[in-house]
Image (spheres, grey):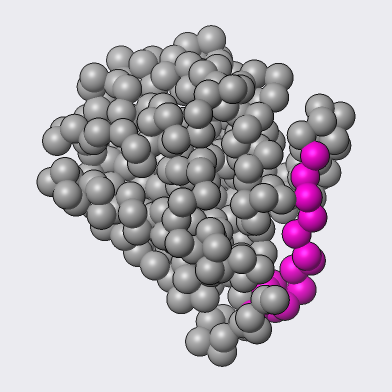
Amino acid sequence: MRVPPTTTISPQARALLSDSPAIAARSMELNAIRERRKASAEMFGPVAKALADGLGVTLTEETIGGVRTQVVTPVTVTGNAAILYFFGGGYVQGSPDEDLAITARLAHLTQRRVYAPYYALAPEHPFPRGLEDGLAVYATLAARYGAAALTVSGESAGGGLALALMLKVEEKPAKAALMSPWSDLTKTGDTLTTLVGNDPWLHYELTLEPAATAYANGRALNAPELSPIYADFPADFPKTLITTGTRDLFLSDCARLSTKLRAACIDCELRVFEGMWHVFEFEADLPEADQSLAEIAAFIRG
């Protein structure tokens, strides 16, 4: 049973939690996935585009490393630096168009271009195709800007993809900014059990496990290339910021990840927002989302 929202969060956040519907099981049958992709794009795409238009950012597309990529350019571009951003959606849905609610604000706040690849999705293209797409875009941007001028960012599955990419590349980016990253595809973290019903978006058996299985395509879910939390993090891994909330089903995994990074002597900060859920930054009218994105932008600008 969902715990009523606390009065310590904004009225907008309380309303969203109170009005959110019960989580339903998600079929991984291809036609069902395509219907969900279409419904999600129709629900979130126009709102995100309106937000981007309001900020005055310019949207273009570029094929980078053979991968279709959305380029979000702010009104003012300062310096020669950029952000590579990976959208979320459990590796089975989502797109840069829906994530404009985040990427447009990041571009505006950082005065940097944001490159968001349309990486391939499961089940049509399971692991490692999405990672390969990300690596191809990263290689091109690193040659264009220099790896030290890049920030790699992403939310949820996109955060997991960002982690896997940064573990694989030899020339690391300057920074990593991760929102509720899906760093462990298994049901290991404490809050995957203790917060059941309190995150309006996630449920392991109903939504996460079917997507993880489709993406893994027969591989063990705890394989480090799928669940980066089980990887060995090198000392030159970039300075990292992780955001989450006290209702985020991935709260424990974010805590475990930050602890592991610090144990490897990597500069990592975990920021936990009161009463917030999985990737609350996605909500365009949420004060807490504005605050978190402003802090993320400040971290990126350094």
Nearest the viewer among 296 and 211 is 211
Name the one closer to the observer, 179 or 288. Answer: 179
Q: Quadrant of residue 273?
A: bottom left
Whether 195 is among the magenta residues is no
Q: Look at the image and tell me whether residue 150 can be seen.
A: no
Task: Note whether 129 is above or below 258 in the view shown.
Answer: above
Location of residue 64 with respect to 166 vertically, above or below: above
Residue at image point 58% right, 42% down: 88
| Residue 280 locus on image (x, y percent) | 55, 61
Name which residue lies at 86% across and 29% down: 31
Residue at image location 23% in from the left, 35% down from the top: 233
Q: Residue furthest top?
A: 66
Q: Is residue 137 above or below residue 289?
A: above
> What is the total number of numbered labels drawn onto the structure image?
0
Whether 165 is drawn above or below 261: the answer is above
- Which residue is at 38% across, 36% downward? 228
Residue 19 covered by magenta stretch: yes
User: Could you say where residue 200 lies in the image, as x and y percent from the top left?
Assistant: 67, 64
Place of residue 62 in the rendered image (x, y in percent of width and height, measured from the top left): 55, 19
Closest to the observer, 56 or 274: 274
In the rendered structure, which segment of residues is drawn in magenta? 14-27
